[in-house]
Amino acid sequence: MTGNGVIHVAGGALAVVAGLLAAASPLARAEEGPRIIVITAKRFEFSPKEITLKKGETVKLQLKSEDVTHGFFLRPLRIDTDIPAGQTAEVTVTPQEVGRYRAICDHFCGAGHGGMKMTIVVEEATGSTGGK
Ligand SMILES: [Cu+2]
């Protein structure tokens, strides 16, 4: 029997996980990093249907496909990426213009593809309060 061997393998896996957690913690402490917004893509919609960003604020969009490959295209914000089937694509964006933008899926994904879109609202940043 190789019972001891199995135990050793399990212990090694735990050590690897612990190592990964330790390696990740310095990043987790950097709270100045970009805000992360998760957007889910599936036939034939994005969820949420609308997000609001602040002008000049850098955000990281995590685009998750729950089924097939989708696209995410928003020319004014210079976003043009594919979201591979079942995977997550990341884009970092810093909007410079206030407005309402329409992001579309630009990778054909089926019958409802033409209606697959979402809205990204960019608002004026309200950074300083009480500066009357
Ligand atoms: Cu599509």
Image (spheres, rainbow, N blue to C red):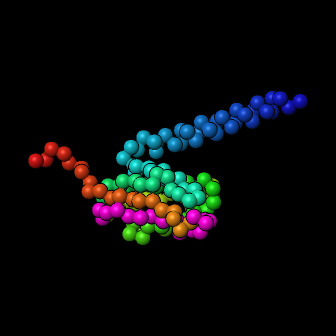
Q: Is residue 22 above or below residue 48?
A: above
Horizontal side, residue 20 vs residue 62: left or right? right
Image quarter of residue 79: bottom left
Q: Residue at x 36, y 53 (%)?
A: 52
Name the main secondary structure of what is drawn in magenta. loop
Q: Residue at x 55, y 39 (%)?
A: 21
Q: How many discs mark residues in the rendered view? A: 0
Image quarter of residue 18: top right
Residue 1 point in image, percent of width and height: 89, 30
| Residue situated in front as seen by the camera: 33 or 132 | 132
Residue 106 point in image, percent of width and height: 53, 69
Residue 50 point in image, percent of width and height: 41, 54
Magenta segment: 97-112
Note whether residue 72 is visible: no
Q: Residue at x 31, y 63 (%)?
A: 99
Magenta segment includes 37: no
